[in-house]
Image (tube, rainbow, N blue to C red):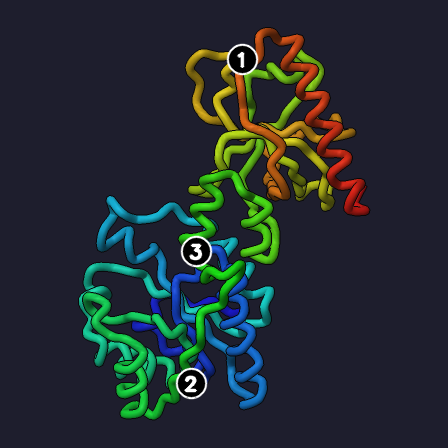
Amino acid sequence: MNIYVDPLRRSDLPRGGVMTIGNFDGVHTGHQEMLRRVVDRARELDAPSVVLTFDPHPMRILHPQRAPGLIQTLRQREEAIAALGVDALVVVPFTREFAAMPAEEFVRDLLGRSLGAREVHVGSAFAFGCGKRGNVTLLSKLGEEAGIRVVPLDVVAEGGEPVSSTRVRTLLGAGSVAEVRRLLGRPFAMEGVIAKGDRMGRKIGYPTINLKSENELYPRDGVYVTKVLLRSFERTFTCVTNIGRRPTVYEDYATTVESYILDFSSDVYGEPIRLTFFDRLRDERVFPSMLELTAQIRRDVEATRLWFLSRGEG
């Protein structure tokens, strides 16, 4: 997939493509359905499939106090979109000047002149232009004037409710990572590097890695069934992860993301990793003693091992 940044200043953009437009945070199953339709239609027409997105999220510029935490980093979003077979990702730097662009200019200059769009596929609730005054009806009218066919698509539902990035964020905040996995079509993932901690886990027989995360959103504090991709080893390892403040050890401590990797003992400080979440085991809680904490960690490790074995992944 080719990536093009700041399309209004470029002359090498893919033209005559089948497009869709949106933030696509999470690239959840609703987004995936849209992107697959765009890719399939582009192949039918022997045209490029193009995704137009924005960075930063428009709410960061327009209403920063109400801006949501993002499910993915931009790189994660790019990878998820590329995995669906999209040919080109066009990233618009979202500024107040861009936000003030009238709907007519957005269609005429960006979709029409710059990208020469052949078709634009959007959700039925799509809004665009200054103040989000443009809707699918206006987009269809302006598209017809610019020679662009507009195709509205219904929202994808799961469990009787629309699949949305907001719904995914809410579930992450509740720690419902198994449900998040269904809505994303893959486990929720955090990325970053392994930072040095206080080595308390090593002292009690369960050495952990500490993730310095690039992601904005964390699942709710608690203990999770996880896997970690260690890029230098080029393989994934089973682990149990605690997100929280470690109240048994410290009275007041910053939130950490600590993982005990099963059957692993190498020194991997500074390694880039991807941590994926499969299920939630329990809340974080205070234990009367370090001995009881250690016994609970042992049970968490066995529960994690059994979780994967029961699914044929042990």
Q: Are marks 2 and 3 in contact (CB under 8 Å)?
A: no
| Residue identifier under label 1 | 248
Q: Position of residue 243 (x, y in %)?
A: 53, 29
In this rendering, position of residue 52 left or right of residue 32: left
Query: Hey, what amino acid is under mark 3?
Result: Ser
Q: Residue at 57% of width from left, 81% of height from top?
A: 40
SS category of the residue bearing label 1? loop
In this rendering, position of residue 306 left or right of residue 73: right
Q: Position of residue 164 (x, y in %)?
A: 44, 59
User: Is 272 above or below relative to 254?
Assistant: below
In this rendering, position of residue 292 left or right of residue 25: right
Quadrant containing the N terminus is bottom right
Q: How far is mark 2 from mark 3, CA to CA?
A: 25 Å
Q: How far is mark 1 from mark 3, CA to CA?
A: 34 Å
Q: Decide which of 96, 41 is in the foreground and name it.
A: 41
N-term mark: 2 or 1: 2
Question: Which one is closest to the eye, mark 2 or mark 1?
Answer: 1
In this rendering, position of residue 308 left or right of residue 215: right
Q: Tell me which corner region of the image, top left, top right, bottom left or bottom right, holds residue 142.
A: bottom left
Q: Decide which of 292, 15 is in the foreground and name it.
A: 292
Query: Hey, what amino acid is under mark 2?
Result: Glu
N-term mark: 1 or 3: 3
Q: Position of residue 20 (x, y in %)?
A: 43, 74
Mark 3, Cα crowd under 10 Å, few <14 / some 14-19 / many 20+, is: many
SS category of the residue bearing label 2? strand
Q: Residue at 46% of width from left, 82% of height from top?
A: 18
Q: Position of residue 191 (x, y in %)?
A: 54, 43
Query: Hey, what amino acid is under mark 1?
Result: Thr
Q: From this viewpoint, is residue 1 visible?
A: yes
